[in-house]
Image (spheres, rainbow, N blue to C red):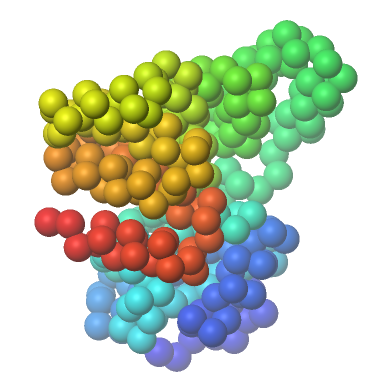
Amino acid sequence: MARETSPYIIDGNRGNFQDSVLKNSHKGPVMVNYWAEKAGPCLRLWPVLEKLAGGYAGRFLLVNINTDREAALAREYGVTSVPTVKLFLRGQVVDQIHGAESETQFRRMLDRQLARESDSQLAQAAGIYQQGNTKEAFAALDSLMIQDPDNPRIFLAYAKLLMREKRYRRAAEVIDASGLENNSEEAAMLKANAIILATVEQAPPLEQLRQALDENADDPDLLFRLAARQLIADDAAAALENLLRIMQIDRHYRNGVAPSSMRAIFAMLGRDQPLVREFRQRMLDLP
C-alpha cells in the first residue's frame, strides 16, 4: 500500500518488534496498528492514523503490523480481528480499540497516556507517601481520582500503593472503578495479582484444599484458591493448570479472573518461556 514516509511510522514484524514496540514504549507511547490488506476498515483507518502520527509529531510512534504476514505475532497479543489498535507503554498494553473508530476516539486514547496537568499532583502525592504520610497521600489520590478521572496513571498508582500496604481487595476495587481492566494489560494484571493475594490471605492450607477438591473437583472457588496457594508456593505450572480448568468450567468466573490471572503469570515468567508458550496455546485451543 502506498503511503507517505514519516519518521514516526514503522512497519513492524517479528524481527523488530522487541526494539520498535517494547523498547520504544519505555520512551513513550507506541501505537500498534494490526491490519490486513484486504480488509476495507483497515484501509479507511490508515489515513486517520497517519494524520495523527504527523500531527502529534513524535509524541507517539505508530507501528503497523500486517497480520497476513505476522499472524503468529498478532495471536500472541490476542488479535482476532482487524483493525485492532493497541497502545503500548512501559512494555505493556495500556489501551486498545477494536475497529475503525473515529479520529476523536484515537485522540482520546493517546491523550490519556500523554502528560497531563494532574501528573504533577500525582507526583506530589507519591512524594507524600514516600515520606511516610500514608493517610495524607491516599487522601490526595482520592481527590485526584475525582478531579481527573481520565488519567489512568492516578488509578494505577493508587492501586500499586494499596498493594504495598497489603490492602489487596481495595486495590482490586480501585482498578474496577477505573474502567481500565478491559483495555489495559497493566491494569488487568495488577487486578489479577491483587485478587490472587487477597485470596491467599483467606485460603485454607494446600492439603485441605486438595481434600475438598477430591469431593468437588469442579468447584471454581476451590480451584482458584488452590491456584493462588500454588502460585505463592512457586508452582506456576500447577497454578496455570488449575486456572485453565476454571476456564473450561466457567470462562466468566469472577468476571474472567482466570484468564487475567494466567496472563499475569505469563508476564511474570516471560513470554518466551516454554511453559508460557504451552499454556498460551492451550488457552487459544479452548472451545
Q: Quadrant of the N terminus?
A: bottom left
Q: Residue at 49% across / 27% down in the picture?
A: 197
Q: Quadrant of residue 224?
A: top left
**Residue 66 on image: x %, y %:** 39, 81
Q: Tell me, yes or no, if residue 146 can be seen here.
A: no
Name the residue: 38% across, 66% down: 277
- In the rendered view, does 53 fall on the left or right side of 124? left
Which corner quadrant holds the C terminus? bottom left
Q: Residue furthest bottom?
A: 2
From the top left corner, tell me how far across and down residue 158 is, in percent: 63, 25
User: Residue 91: where, in percent of width, then height?
Assistant: 60, 58
In the image, taking residue 2 as reference, residue 21 lies left or right, namely right
Vertical position of residue 229 compared to residue 185: above or below: above
Q: Nearer the viewer, residue 214 or 147?
A: 214
* Image point (45%, 40%), residue name: 231
Eyeballing the image, is 60 above or below 149?
below
**Residue 13 visible from this viewpoint:** yes
